[in-house]
Image (cartoon, rainbow, N blue to C red):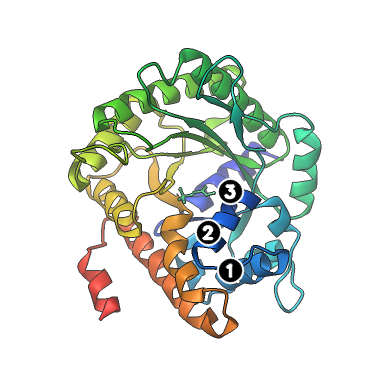
Amino acid sequence: MAAKDLHETAKALVAEGKGILAADESDGTIKKRFDSIGVESTEENRRAYRGLLFTTEGAKEYISGVILFDETIRQSSEDGTAFPKLLESKGIIPGIKVDKGAKPLALAEGETITEGLDGLRDRLEEYYGLGARFTKWRATYSIGSDTPSEYCVWTNAHALARFAALSQEQGLVPIVEPEVLMDGEHTIEQSLKASGRVLQALYVELHDQRIDLRGTLLKTNMALSGYDASDRAGVEEVAQETLECLYRHVPAAVPGIVFRSGGQSDEDATAHLNAMNRMGTHPWEVSFSYGRALQAPALKAWGGDPANVEKAQEAYLHRAHMNGLARSGDYSPEMEEKVAA
Ligand code: 13P
């Protein structure tokens, strides 16, 4: 795979007005989502739900790519079309989550290391054959009095870079995802400091392991106050602090930064993205790779009933549209009320 193809795929994933749908919930996570609507997490229900999202008419105007889970990349829509083929036919790029989850980091109480490097080269080859053109690997860090530790920061940065190198070797654009979690009472300043430390180490490892940054994307958290913080930062402050962190630590060769929603409300996630894009032209595209913030209203509207598919698709399309507008700073919260009315 020529470097040019990696660059083009990365750029296409952050095309104007578009972002990525994260539909790569692991078995445990999708079960939690289904539990919230009282639906059993069977293979068929997961297929039906994801199929509903992927067949939504008009979503391709706002969605450039979809991150799939191992089970989903092998499933098909009602008419027997394999999901990767279906997405491709709409001009949406199929991608795949390839990490095996964040596990306890030995000798580091409360910290995690992401696993999944063993045998990764072979898995990537198979995923490419199944139609994937990009990959994702997520590492998590929590903010505490002594965390994230340097040990956790560097072991995860090393693993992220190894994943990225193997992906590029296989012709797949790696989305490297360090996520500083929102759990806790931390301030936005603490989030900024931890996120900056994590990103700085990540780009050292990516450089040392010969990654072509133009053929990558960064997926990360915004700088946010902890869920349980008493005084939470507002939209403008979140946007400013997040950009400040990224300007300090992310090289301009990276084509795009795609945020995760990470537990923000749907509308907060859209408003924060919008505010960042209003603050000017940036060295990289500032976009989204949302899971919950794109799917939550659709999941609720569906509720496991085939009769609700259309309503659920409308809800998904609406969130995709709002986030598409936030890509250029053209979103406003009044647009939500009009639809609700
Ligand atoms: P959230 O946007 O819900 O944080 O999720 C992103 C993601 O990658 C889910 O797998």
Q: Amino acid at mark 2?
A: Arg
What x and y, as percent, mark residue 222? Answer: 35, 40
Apparent side of residue 257 relative to residue 330 in the rendered image (left or right) = right
Q: Position of residue 284 (x, y in %)?
A: 39, 40
**CA neighbours of label 2 inside 10 A, class few (<14), some (14 to 19), many (20+):** some
Report the residue marked by disc 3: 9
Which of these two is toward me, 243 or 114?
114
Q: Earlier in the sequence, mark 3 or mark 1?
A: 3
Q: Is residue 90 visible?
A: no
Q: What residue lies at 45% left-to-right and 56% top-to-bottom?
A: 292
Left or right? Give the position of 44 relative to 61.
Answer: right
Left or right: 143 in relation to 103: left
- Secondary structure beneath dot 1 equals loop
State the residue at coordinates (24%, 77%).
338
Instruction: Provide the residue designation for mark 2.
Output: 33
Please tell me how crowded label 3 is: few (under 14), some (14-19), or many (20+) other residues with Cα within 10 Å.
many
Mark 1: give few (<14), some (14-19) or many (20+) Cα within 10 Å. some
Question: Which residue in the protein does label 1 denote?
Answer: 39
Q: Quarter-wise, where is residue 243 in the image?
A: top left
Residue type for callout 1: Val
